[in-house]
Each structure stands twice: as C-alpha cells, then as structure tokens.
Amino acid sequence: MKGSLTNRRNAVDVPASAGGAKLVAEDVAVTYQSRGRETLAVSGVNLTLADGEFVAIVGPSGSGKSTFLMAVDGLIPLSAGRITVNGRTVTRPGADQAVVFQDASLLPWRTVLDNVTYGLELAHRPKREREEIGRALINVTGLGGFEGYYPRQLSGGMQQRVNIARALAADPEVLLLDEPFSGLDAQTRETMQGELLKIWDERKKTAVFVTHQIDEAVYLADRVIAFSARPARIVAEWKVPFERPRPLELKQSPEGHALEREIWHVVRAEGKMKP
Amino acid sequence: MSTQTEVSGPPMAGRAAPARSAPGRTWARSRPVLLGTASVILLLVIWQVVTELNLVKQIFLPTPLQVFDALKSVFSGGPIWNDLAVSGEEFVIGLGISIAIGAALGILTGWYKPVDEFFKPIVVALNSMPQVAVIPVLILIFGIGITPKVIVVCLSCAPVILMNTAAGVGNVDERLMRVARSFGASDWQAIRTIVFPEVVPFFMTGLRISIGRAIIGVVVGEIFASKAGLGSLLITASDSFNMPVMYASVIIITALGILLTQVAAWLERRMQVWRT
C-alpha cells in the first residue's frame, strides 16, 4: 500500500438503468490478494436499492460482506460487474458514498468538530460552511457540547457517533456501514441502534448495513439480505414488514423473533457450507 | 478476582494519599521544586566544604564563590558575546541542516522500504560511532572555522532525527489512511492530514535528543581548535590554568543545554496533547 494510495480511474457517466434506483450492483464479483493467493470473495451479486431504502446484509463469518461493502465504496476494485450510484459508475471512493467502519478511526489529534468536518475539508469547502454543517450534525448525533473534545476523551459509543456524523457530513448519496456497533457493549449497542434510526428517520439516506447480528438487521432495515459463504452470492432476501418509526420494544416482539429465527436458520445453514 | 500474594517490600514512600486540603495540595505541587533545589544546594555546600578543607587542591577545584566571580567577570567582558554568537551559529546551522536532511530522509526511509535498506548501514554506523573522533580530520581538511563543527553536528544529529522521523512514518495507522482514502483524499491530502500529524511527535523527540548531541559537537569541536566560541573559551582558560573561568564556561554550556532541551521538551509536550 505504501507509495500508492488510490486507484485513479475516473468515474464515467452512464444513463440510469433502472428508473428511480439509487444503488445498483450488477453481477458484481470481487477478488482479493492475500499472501500471494487470489481469493474470490464475492461472485455474482445483483442488488438494487431504491432511494431512501435501508438494506441490511447478514451472512456467515468471512463471507465477503465487508469486501462487498468496500467495493461499493470504491475502495476495492471489482473483478467483474458494475456498481452504479445515481447511474454513475463507482470506480473510486468519492463524495457519493461514505463509510462508517467498525473502528471509529477518528483522527486523534483533531477535536470532535474537526473530525466531523474532515470529509468537507478534503472537499475544499469553506471554513464557515464546514463548521455550520459540522455543528448541526454534532447536535443531531447527540454530541452537543463535545465539539472541542479529543477522541481519547470519548467513550466507544460516542466515538462511533462522531464516526457517523463524519460520514453524514459529506451528505453522501449512499451511506455504508460495516458492523459499526460490533465493538460496543450490548447496552451501548442497543442505544446506538435506536440513535441511528432516529438520525436516519430524519434524513432517509439510502443505506447498506453489514452485520452479524440478525436482530440488529431486522430492527434497522427495510430489507434483509443473506449472503452465502465465500464466494458470496445472495441466497435469500426478506422484506421487513414493520412500520416506522420503530420502538426498541420491537426487538422483543414475537413477530420480530419469528423473522429473526427464519433468517438465522438460513445463515446458519450457509455457515456450515464453508469453502 | 482471587487475591494474589504480593512480594512485600518497603512501603511506597512516594505514594501519598491524594491531598484534599489546600496546604496538602500546595505541598504536593512545590515538593519537586523544593527537593530539586535542596539537592543543588547540598551539592554546592559539599563543593564549598571540599575546597575549603583542601580535600582537592584549589588549583584544580576553585571554590564556588571563585567560580561565581569568574562568571561575573566573563559576562561583564566583551568577548563572551562573540563566543556565544560563534557557538550559536555553529549550533543553529548544524542543527538546521540536520533537521532538513533528517526529516526528508526520515520520511523517505519510513515510506519506501528500498530507501530504508539503502541507507541503513550508513545511518547505523554514524549513530554508533563517536562522532567527535573525526574532528581532527575535519579540521585538517576544512580549517578551524565553523565548517568542521557544523559537519560534526550533522553527523551526530541527522541520524537521530532520521530514525525518529522514520519511526513516526512507520507508526501511521493504516485505518486512518483507509479513512482518508474512503473520503477520496489525494495522495498529498493523505500525507498532509494523516502522515504529517502522526510524524510530528516522533520528529520532536528526535529533535530534543539531538540538542544535547549538537552542543557536544560544537563544544568539543571548538576545544580541538577554534578561534572563538564557548569551547574555545573553555580550553583557553584551561590552558592558562585559569580554573575559575574554565569551570564558569562549563556552567554556561550546561545552563544553555538545559535551557534548550527544556524548550524542546515543552514543544514536544505541546504537540502531543491529543495522545493518551
């Protein structure tokens, strides 16, 4: 990685294929190199998200969910297929997509405000504008009053809030979340799920959320998609029938549990079919 | 949790319970200053006693008062300012070049493995050798002006700054680079926003260490051969058996060293506010 930072290929404008679709993945395959060996992580994934749709991806460990997400962001090149956002092909990371990684990865030498405005700074937005947007998001994510704090002074949950605020600050077309709450304790995790829905309800961003926790997927998403074991393809899809806004009690409801069980069985069966 | 048998030792004398009362807090804050001053005073007392009792001949070790008088006379005379200027010039130029070379090569060696492999033998050798040993040769080649001293300072300091800077580059968190890339940062933006801030604390450490080495390089160089400078002041006094002035010059050099190192240490701390 040292010495070369981005794949510099230009995005090419392509007319939108499916009307109204925000994110389209067509026959996507992703290969990655590891220890001199090539591994096919994702093979033949077809996925379409409508504007404002929240989709969760579940699947057995190591199935390529995160790899797929990174490919959607443009961090990893595709070995086949195409990904488009708003009809524009994604070839490298940019303003259209923003990722919330599992690790908050905040810049430790910057305050919360400067961390939130990082993406805006890279995009050369003027300072006044950056601060305005930054402060607004800090309030939305419940971080009001902590603008001047440094990451080391914040708890894990708060750092993830900054992470989310940072991703939203750039106002991306698609929000990508890679197990953002896996590093948190169970209580904080549940709180953050509720917080994310609150934030999301206001802005209705098209979102792809990768997780291991099926109850989390059902609670948050409009649709839950199950990946197979590696090389990943989509094996099943469920529409989550619950209305929004969703109270946390939903997680304890019989309907919620029934859906979770169904998904759990599929994922477990896939998990047994390790390559 | 099971209780573990601890090896019992002397009670932890330094660990006082946190002071709640105001007098307790003042004591805790002023204690380092008081204890530190006490040791210096004790040293001065021992010094005075040793010389008065002639345990060491006064030709070799003058009394503290004699040295203090010498300090006064040195600073009321003219030449000291020129000496300070000359030594200062050698120090600043030598350190300046060391910073330029050390930081630039440090980043390159930290970033590109082949560059690191290429420079490694030279850097390790320079760092391990007694750099002042080459002063006689340098003086033969370059004369007794400032050049040999500047070169010695570079030989002493550039490797240290290089190695510390390279360590900083190696310490750059991959995850932060990934964040920069995910926001579409260009190479230069990533270096500017992620690498530089990460490297600065390491560089500052290298700088702080280098200050002591630079002073040694300057002073020893001047002791060997020089027209002017603090080292020259020292050796001239020593040659003419003017012990009070010789010790006075040692004190001046030491005081400068302490001052500069403390400034560098303060800067270093300022740059690390965000670290745990």
Image: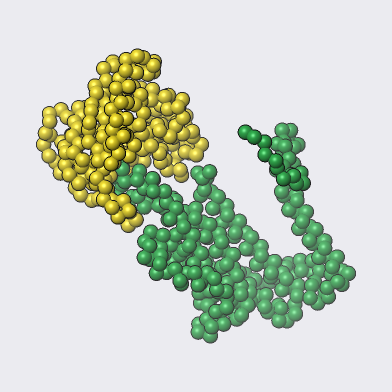
Chain colours: A yellow, B green
* Residue A102 falls left or right of residue B269: left
Residue A3 located left or right of residue B252? left
Q: Residue furthest right?
A: B53
Residue displayed at 79% across by 62% down: B44
**Considering depth in this image, is B140 or A89 the residue closer to the camera?**
A89
**Extreme residue toward the top, this view:** A254
Decide if residue B73 is in sight here: no
Pick the front one: B96 or A97: A97
Residue B200's x, y, as percent? 47, 53
Farthest bottom residue in view:
B140
Residue A222 visible in this rendered orientation of the protein: yes
User: Is B68 left or right of B120, judged from the image as shown?
Assistant: right
Residue A63: % across, % down: 29, 38
Q: Residue at x 39, y 16 (%)?
A: A252
Q: Nearer the viewer, residue B190 or B61?
A: B190
Q: Position of residue B74 (x, y in %)?
A: 70, 70
Q: How many marks?
A: 0
- Looking at the image, is A215 positioned above or below residue B65? above
Displayed quadrant of residue B111: bottom left
Viewport quadrant of the N terminus of chain B: top right
Tell me the quarter of the picture where residue B86 sits: bottom right
Query: Residue, x 44% and y 53% (percent of image)?
Result: B171
Residue visible at 51% across and 72% down?
B126
User: Along the horizontal axis of the image, is A190 left or right of B240?
Assistant: left
User: Where residue B165 appears, x then y in whole percent?
Assistant: 46, 59
